Amino acid sequence: MLKYVRKYVLFALLAAAFMVSEVSMDLIQPTIMSRIVDEGVLGTANGGVGDLHLILTLGIRMIGLVLFGGLCGSLNNVFTHIAAQNVGNDIRKDCFRRIMTFSFPQMDRFGTGSLVTRVTNDITQVQTLLSLFVRGMIRTTMLTFGSMYCMYRLNPAFGRLVLCAFPLIVAVMAFCMKRSTPMFVRLQAQLDGINAIMQEDVSGIRVIKACVREAYEKARFGKANDALTGTQLSVLTLFAFMNPTVNAIMYVVVSLILLAGSHQVQAGTTTPGVIMAAITYTTQLLNGVLMLVMLFQNISRGVASWKRVREVLRSEPELRDGPCKAPLRGRIELRDVSFAYPGGGHNVLEHINLTIEPGETVAVMGATGCGKSTLVRLIPRFYDVTEGAVLVDGVDVREYDQQALRGQIAIALQKSELFTEGIGENIAWGKPGASQEEIEQAAAVAQAEKFILRTPYGYETPVAERGMSLSGGQKQRLSIARALIRRAPVLIFDDATSALDLATEARLYDALAEMAPQSTKIIVAQRIATVRRADKIVVLERGRIAACGSHEELLRTCETYREIYDSQMGEEEPHE
């Protein structure tokens, strides 16, 4: 953590200096009060005659010290927050940057809910940890040991009483901290679970309502929330036991000080003012210990959160960049490719050999689960192959810089991800800084222009979260426009037109052929009407290429393709 604190160490040091000054003022005051009582009120140094002038002088001095201490406390708060908030800001940015480098398997291992918790709640706990360390640790340490030292100087007997009680207090605190630390780790993990359920249920609320599963999800959330509440109550119960135990020990010390002080007053070896000062120091010591208890509680939680944040910061990207940043022409070759998802245990693709020439349109089709989407995800290197190699322009994709490679491959997915911005801004996501003319041209090719112009504000119309204000076909067309605006040499449609009617789809592909005749196009689809005009159609079956050829060739030679054709097109002749 020092890596982040080092930049703001000046603010931390200033905060520490002001805190030392504030606590010093608190430690000076009981001694002054004892003089006011003994010399000013009781007149122990003047034959029992009080001294009003001394009372006024010392009283004004006390007020001045209180005001100065208050100013130092305020400045301490300011500099502490500056340091802690900036450190938290830097950690949060670094965490997000690191998450953006994660591969899909890494994202799956952490889980979306866990990553959200770590970047929000856990980093907030780290900020609290830093604030308490700069402010609380100095204050509690000085109050605890400073009160003991001042009391010992004031009256050694009183100091020894407090010193005897201190090991008992430390033992109680150590016991509670040892029991509570594992609970904080479990607490954050349970918070991950709640965030994951919340994210799933909010994003899938339409499915929940359609399947009438509200009661089930309420019960699932309630169970997770009950577990979180149970852990929190266990922690609070533990500290509820600790606080009165420490209080009891300190009040026993106060009673012993009063008992010993009464005997000393009678013997003439001490004064009432000294006893009052000793009780005040004991109260300060008690406050310091109680603050130390709360401090260690928050530090334990902050340390647990820091370990979780550090796990993200120390996670190295699994996919390493290569040195190649060459522009693409669009020739793609899959050479004896096999692939299994991490932890999947079996190959999704097996011994795939396929060559796609620049400017060629290749369609990929097959039954659900045969590996169509997996195949196209290997080209932009969302995953690394298990065996074989994927080559673009003769270079293994593992040799490319990932951003350089993906920057030249435009992808439109079946599940359209839109952002809570305007329609035009969602299209321009594909090409930052795109002109309005480029946005409108991409929308026209994607057959989105008509419905956009019918919206209240045209291209400025805001899109609801996750595109919920649009139909499935409208979202797909905006996603296609976002891909087309890039004018990339390789264009991948992963079932991206499944929600479009056949007429709209046909107009889209006609416009696409005119707009990007040189681009290599890979189309994953389920409909014969979508793939029949491709230069080459690849039929996948159980992760292997069952056949490859044009529409007419496959109708003659591939039984699987012919069955798909008959199921979709009926008994029509191929030329029809």
Image (spheres, grey):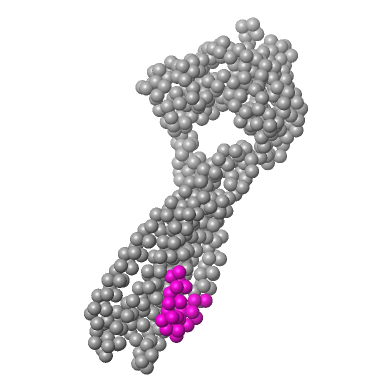
Q: Position of residue 387 (x, y in %)?
A: 75, 33
Residue at 25% in and 75% down: 56
The residue range painted magenta reads 142-167
The reply to whether residue 155 is in sight is: yes
Drawn side of residue 185 relative to residue 25, left or right: right
Residue at 48% in and 54% down: 10
Residue at 53% in and 20% down: 485
Drawn side of residue 164 relative to residue 393, left or right: left
11 w.r.t. 174: above or below = above
Q: Main secondary structure of the magenta part?
A: helix
- As for residue 133 lying within the magenta part, the answer is no
Residue in front for this viewpoint, 333 or 279: 279
Residue in front for this viewpoint, 73 or 529: 73
10 w.r.t. 551: above or below = below
Residue in front for this viewpoint, 175 or 94: 94
Residue at 53% in and 63% down: 180
Q: Quadrant of the C terminus?
A: top right
